[in-house]
Amino acid sequence: MLLSRVPIAISLIMLATFCIVVHSAEKTDAPSDDVKSFRKSTLLQRFDLDQDGELTSAERKKLHAAFGGIAVPMLPDVTMRYTLRPPNVSEAELRKLDNSPDSNPLTDAGATLGRVLFYDRQLSKNNTIACASCHLQERAFADPKRLSTGFKGGQTGRNAMALFNLRYTVIRGQRPGFFWDERAETLEDQVLMPIQDPVEMGMKLPELVVRLQALPYYQQLFTSAFGTADVTSDRIAKAIAQFMRGMLSFDSKYDRAMAVGNGSFSDDFAAFTPQENLGKSLFIDGVGGIGEIGCALCHIPPTFGMPRAFNNGLDPKYADKGVGARDVPSNDLFTPSNDGKFKSSPLRNIALTAPYMHDGRFKTLEEVIEHYSDGVHPHVNLGLAFAEDAESTRKKTSGFALTREQKSALIAFLNTLTDEKFIADSRFSNPFVRLED
Ligand code: HEC
Ligand code: HEC
């Protein structure tokens, strides 16, 4: 009797220990079990036959075939964090900049789903184009091509915009819309536009819902993010918006240099070269220390984003009228209309996002600076920074009339805004197992 009880007691103890281990594992390892089947460890167990931790191209083909010939994502074993606070910017400042709506709080599970959707080519009519086809991580999610190519080979009307810090766009109480012409009021509204755009992805929303419902990996991802497996266009928009709100870039040389100073961006930074400090001063304090003629009047730190669209004098007459093509009243008291007004991406990572401007007309930052120095065309809607100059001279074009030294300094400063970690961060990389190497 006694003998037979001992093993029972031992098994009970073992069972209890097992339960505790499982329980605590659940606690630290936040994601619920349901995304497991597409987790890296599970997929490697099934398909990494030589168990070397990587899939050879033959193994990738097998994986592809096992899922009926479609690409599937390989999800991280431990859910990645998209809700971390960015370093170097104060909590109070971030709160003011935040555009997150109460109806779509950012969660790690939501952003994880959003990441898969962002990279999924099944979101386009003929399964060829994902958001990431035009928004490349190594380019801070801009496109090195002047215009991007859509699902049928057609070209977009404008240059693809860089994507980061889209959570923090409320500048001095103003809420600029998304796109160069601000036509999307919220990020949630924005997401469904490229999907349905006849050039970009060409999809109908009801068709998209049916298609995603049939894909094996979405049931689990939607359940983790929203509690049930239902796929709706509202949830698709919310999840991608969450992913994009999680794409934060606040770790550049500029941020690190400011953090070791006293936190004021007007003082010289000890960690900057004299040239970078001169560039910073021209950018932030303005040429000759006159803030009204500084770049930061429109590209405002700490995000270096714009509070609304402006006209920066690219052309005397605009082929693309920008916000002016939309039926909305002038966005300020000083200009008669919105003709030729555009809202650019924030200038962080600007060294990575060439070509520049809404039509990608400038190939280099040198060309951009030449424009601001001497190439600004007069225009009735010209931003205040240039307006006086344009009125007081009879020249065809005007600008800040920068010296050679000032031009190089501005470029040196713009180069300090690059965040190398952001473009290498696996939280924002392609989760799909690629067939090609
Ligand atoms: C075929 C290329 C292409 C595809 C695919 C594409 N985009 Fe874009 N994206 C662009 C272009 C071009 C613009 C600027 C368009 C404009 O302003 O008229 C843009 C602008 C944006 C903006 C505005 C950024 C800002 O600061 O205002 C966001 C956000 C964005 N895209 C997200 C997405 C998402 C999410 C997807 C997938 C659902 C996607 N894009 C698919 C080309 C593309
Ligand atoms: C009056 C407001 C204003 C001022 C001042 C201003 N900009 Fe701009 N900037 C804009 C607008 C508007 C755009 C987008 C114009 C377009 O595409 O049509 C832009 C675009 C840019 C771009 C390209 C962004 C991209 O993603 O393609 C760069 C780089 C830039 N500005 C740098 C500067 C620098 C450097 C200065 C100071 C020398 C400066 N800006 C001053 C309004 C301004």
Image (cartoon, rainbow, N blue to C red):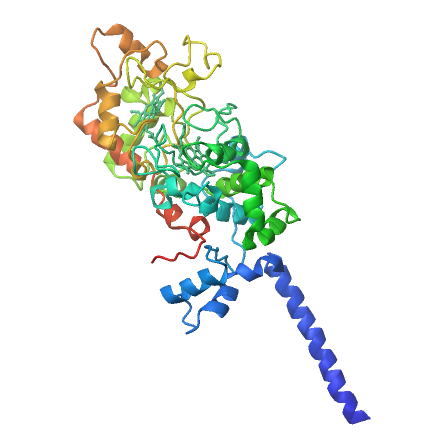
Q: Is residue 177 visible?
A: yes
**Residue 340: % across, % down:** 36, 17
* Ligand 2 in which quarter: top left
**Residue 113: % across, % down:** 54, 48
Task: Locate residue 426 relative to residue 364 in the image: left or right.
Answer: right
Q: From the viewer's perspective, is residue 380 above or below residue 240?
A: above
Q: Give the quarter of the figure containing the N terminus.
A: bottom right
Which residue is pictured at 47% across the width and 67% down the height? 44
Q: Nearer the viewer, residue 222 or 247?
A: 222
State the residue lying farthest toward the right: 1
Q: Nearer the viewer, residue 91 or 116?
A: 116
Q: Nearer the viewer, residue 335 or 315?
A: 315
Which residue is pictured at 35% across the width and 28% down the height? 158
**Residue 269: % across, % down:** 33, 37
Q: Nearer the viewer, residue 413 or 299?
A: 299
**Residue 105: % across, % down:** 60, 40
Task: Locate residue 275 relative to residue 322 in the image: left or right.
Answer: left
Q: From the viewer's perspective, is residue 408 above or below residue 331?
A: below
Q: How many marks?
A: 0
